[in-house]
Amino acid sequence: MKRQFLKTLSIAAMVSAGFLFSTDALADRTLRLSLQVNTKHPIGANIVFFKQQVEKASAGKLKIEIYDSAQLYKGSEIPQAVGSGAVDMGLVLIDEYAGTIPAVGLFSVAFLFPSYEVLAKAANPSSPVRQEIDELIRKTGTRVMWWQDYGPIQLLSKGDPISEPAQMKGKKVRVLGKPSGDFINALGGIPVKIGGSEQFIAYQRGTVDIGMTGTTAIESRKLFEVMNSVTITNHAQTEFLVVMNDKLFNSMSAQEKKWMGDAALAAELKMRAETKKDNLDSEQFIKDKTSMKVINLTPAQVKSWQEAAKPAIDAYIKDAGPAGQRLVNEVRKFY
């Protein structure tokens, strides 16, 4: 009885002194994070920011090792690699999940998001669109830690500048995934899925006639060296995700989860506040510092692209079923 009392008293004293449940009581942990862009790209820089926030809050108890430029895995390999635990965390274009979960491809459906403001509302953590997509992805064994706002997607050409949908007929076009492939099919083109890190070589070799990416990638990946023009279509407003192995996250202490969650939220808010400016700055860089021609469409031309893309929205709903129709309806409420 006396021994038990002393043991209880000892534990109480340790708690009072802060020896239990403190940062010092946690074992050091290092998480490996794979991404396909370099850390100079805005998305890569955002992950560096996350790393800094985690390591500062944890006083170095929780560390993040970044493997950039597809050193470990290509973007298309991240869902399986993170879900299986082969790597702890990874950066992935949301479209990479659309092959197995069609509804997740929502953000690349052509012209579904008429403005950046609609995108921001749909991608907000409190949005039913965001919440449903996060839950669908978690069923694959990967937990979405935060969303990274990538910005609008454009079309690149090595030959004649693109201004009309009819110019896409018969052309091989780099696509991000199934939804952007449906868009190209609707235009009479030939979709070719090419990973982000493989773009430069694919364009250089002529694997495709038309490219598809954001202006920040044109700058950071130096795509202006292998393509002659970019048409500002803003046809998709896609997102990247930073995902983590769900079992690993669930095994973490409450304190570790808080460090991760706080840093993830800070990183997401920072990225969403900066992305619009980053894309506009890159567009200006292309105009001022490269020989690449920037094509801005007239309102009438934009309308012709929107009309031509309508079958792509129908294709998405058909593939995604009730979940797809529900998500499209939710997005349209933000119009």
Image (cartoon, rainbow, N blue to C red):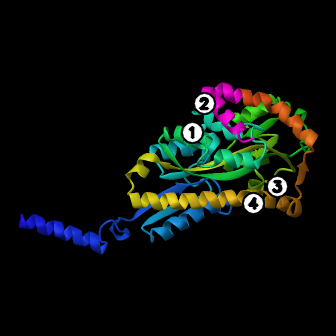
Query: Does the residue at mark 2 contact the one at mark 1 (Cβ under 8 Å)?
Result: yes
Q: Which residue is under mark 3? A: 224
Q: Nearer the viewer, residue 183 or 226?
A: 183
Q: Which residue is under mark 1? A: 132
Question: What is the secondary structure assignment of the residue under circle 1?
Answer: helix
- The disc labelled 2 sits on which kind of residue? Ala
Question: What is the secondary structure assignment of the residue under circle 4?
Answer: helix
Q: Residue furthest left?
A: 1
Q: Which mark is residue 323?
A: 2
Question: Gap between marks 4 and 3, in whole Å?
Answer: 17 Å
Ranked by sequence position, the earlier of labels 2 and 4 is: 4
Query: Does the residue at mark 2 contact the one at mark 4 (Cβ under 8 Å)?
Result: no
Q: Residues within 10 Å of mark 2 (few under 14, many from 20)?
A: some
Ranked by sequence position, the earlier of labels 4 and 3 is: 3
Please tell me whether residue 332 belongs to the stretch shown in magenta. yes
**In the displayed structure image, the side of residue 3 where residue 205 appears, left or right:** right
- The disc labelled 4 sits on which kind of residue? Asp
Residue mark closest to the camera, 4 vs 1: 1
Q: Residues within 10 Å of mark 1 (few under 14, many from 20)?
A: some
Region rendered in magenta: 315-335
Q: Nearer the viewer, residue 86 or 282?
A: 282
Q: Which residue is under mark 4? A: 278
**In the displayed structure image, the side of residue 329 where residue 10 appears, left or right:** left
Question: Gap between marks 2 and 4, in whole Å?
Answer: 33 Å
Question: Gap between marks 2 and 3, in whole Å?
Answer: 39 Å
Q: Nearer the viewer, residue 244 or 11?
A: 11
- The disc labelled 3 sits on which kind of residue? Phe
Query: Which image quadrant is residue 292 in?
Result: bottom right
